């Protein structure tokens, strides 16, 4: 191990040991203290908005070569800062997930057994580019009684540090341990490696970022991982779709923010309506700067569209590019999604309830949507106050990760003097 890696490992160990001590206190913290910390942090975010924007401008200036989509993910605005503060307040309003009785039953011997929600412990959050993730992750971990160590991408270090300072202010105001929310002080990749090897110090790693980051975490981690899907999302416009609704939904699903994981990357359109509707959809999107990659059936209708390769349908564009395929019904649409998708979010636009049910029930994806934009799978739209990615792990959680997904459980057994024969 070189000197830089050694130093990163030392920093991580110190942070993790402090986090474990903080997690023990946080697990017993009453709801009023946690909610106060969140509200005070929200107040600090609003009061520190000029400093946060200045830090973000410095991050943007230090990386001028960024793509437009990456730059959008990195950029903070007054509206996005206000959304961060509002998200913290919304989490404060949610019920405390810790200590809930998840289920209860009585055994034939009279023992009453209860499954009780409890925090996981210390969470390591590794994310790229979007500095608002620091506030979302800190809020959800704090409310669910978990300590968190945040490691943002090197492009967002200044922004994340400025946001972290406001979380520290909230913890201090509530009398909670400041080590409950920590942020990496280095851009050294060795810090991430140390997090991934920190079995016994970190209880769960959550990666949020591109395929490269998630792949590295899955391959190198010696700590349990809550896997995050890349967002290769599909919108399927069924033969019974309302054309005006289809136009509105697709435009939003693709172009509202092209760099978020909930952006639609592939349009599937039913062959029965494609000749009349596809040219209109293409015109809508092209007018706003979108490019296309289309299969042979789509190009037979719109010959000017560039031809798609097989690899194009497996690409998360994160940009103003849309793959297009014409399909003959729900079953072929599902087959396309199974072959090319990432099990993140898929939408169907249709007025046919039976077709919608067939589509939704046929998905393996974490989220299926009927008659709404796939972009609702980003930014706390599920009522969780905030969310820190879409999980596709089959063993722990599926879909947006909120408070309940950051809890595990223990058992309480209540007897009346029973002894085991």
Image (spheres, rainbow, N blue to C red):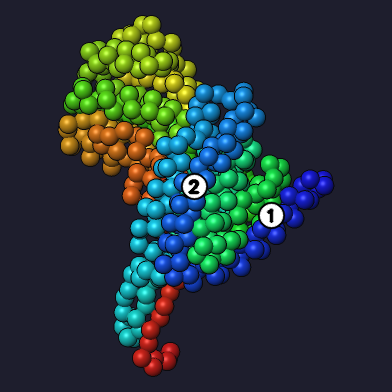
Name the spot of residue 69 as percent of width and height, x first. 50, 26
Kindly state the secondary structure of the residue where label 2 is placed.
Answer: helix
* Residue lying at 77% horizontally and 51% vertically, measured from the top left: 7
Circle 2/circle 1 CB separation < 8 Å:
no
Q: Residue at x 39, y 64 (%)?
A: 96
Q: Of the residues under marks 2 and 1, which one precedes in the sequence?
A: 1
x 44%, y 24%: residue: 313
Q: Quadrant of residue 293?
A: top left
Q: Which mark is residue 12?
A: 1
Looking at the rendering, in which quadrant would you find the C terminus? bottom left
Figure quadrant of residue 147? bottom right
Name the residue rendered at 35%, 29% in the picture.
Answer: 253
How far across and how far down the image is residue 179, in percent?
60, 61
Q: In the displayed structure, would residue 168 be above or below residue 266?
A: below
Residue situated in front as seen by the camera: 156 or 213: 156
Q: Residues within 10 Å of mark 1 (few under 14, many from 20)?
A: many
* Mark number displayed over residue 47: 2
Nearest to the observer: residue 116 or residue 169: 169
Measure the C-alpha gap from mark 2 to mark 1: 30 Å
- Spot occupied by residue 23 in the image (x, y as percentages of width and height): 56, 65
Report crowding for label 2: few under 14, some 14 to 19, many 20 or more residues within 10 A (C-alpha). few
Q: Position of residue 198 (x, y in %)?
A: 66, 57
Residue 154 appears in the figure: yes
Instruction: Give the left or right position of residue 274, taking residue 381 as reference.
Output: left
């Amino acid at each position: 191990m070189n000197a830089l890696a050694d130093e990163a490992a030392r920093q991580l160990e110190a942070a993790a040991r402090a986090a474990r001590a903080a997690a023990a206190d946080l697990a017993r913290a009453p709801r009023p203290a946690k909610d106060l910390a969140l509200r005070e942090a929200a107040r600090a975010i609003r009061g520190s908005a000029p400093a946060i924007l200045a830090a973000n401008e410095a991050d943007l200036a230090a990386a001028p070569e960024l793509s437009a989509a990456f730059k959008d993910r990195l950029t903070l605005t007054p509206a996005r800062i206000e959304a961060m503060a509002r998200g913290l307040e919304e989490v404060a309003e949610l019920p405390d997930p810790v200590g809930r009785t998840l289920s209860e039953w009585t055994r034939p011997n009279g023992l009453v057994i209860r499954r009780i929600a409890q925090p996981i412990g210390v969470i390591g959050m590794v994310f790229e580019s979007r500095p608002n993730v620091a506030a979302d992750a800190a809020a959800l971990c704090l409310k669910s009684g978990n300590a968190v160590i945040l490691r943002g991408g090197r492009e967002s270090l200044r922004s994340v540090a400025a946001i972290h300072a406001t979380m520290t202010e909230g913890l201090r105001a509530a009398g909670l341990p400041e080590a409950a929310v920590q942020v990496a002080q280095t851009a050294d990749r060795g810090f991430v490696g140390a997090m991934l090897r920190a079995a016994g110090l970190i209880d769960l790693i959550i990666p949020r970022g591109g395929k490269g980051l998630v792949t590295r975490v899955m391959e190198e981690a010696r700590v349990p991982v809550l896997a995050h899907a890349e967002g290769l999302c599909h919108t399927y416009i069924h033969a019974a779709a309302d054309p005006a609704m289809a136009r509105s939904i697709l435009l939003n699903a693709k172009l509202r923010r092209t760099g978020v994981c909930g952006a639609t990357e592939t349009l599937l359109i039913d062959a029965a309506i494609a000749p009349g509707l596809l040219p209109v959809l293409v015109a809508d999107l092209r007018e706003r700067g979108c490019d296309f990659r289309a299969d042979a059936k789509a190009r037979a209708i719109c010959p000017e569209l560039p031809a798609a390769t097989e690899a194009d349908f497996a690409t998360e564009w994160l940009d103003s590019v849309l793959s297009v395929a014409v399909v003959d019904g729900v079953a072929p649409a599902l087959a396309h999604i199974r072959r090319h998708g990432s099990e993140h979010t898929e939408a169907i636009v249709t007025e046919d309830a039976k077709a919608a049910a067939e589509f939704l029930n046929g998905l393996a994806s974490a989220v299926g949507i009927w008659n709404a934009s796939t972009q609702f799978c980003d930014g706390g739209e599920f009522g969780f106050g905030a969310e820190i990615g879409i999980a596709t792990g089959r063993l722990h959680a599926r879909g947006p990760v909120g408070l309940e997904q950051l809890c595990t459980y223990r058992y309480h057994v209540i007897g009346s003097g029973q002894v085991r024969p």
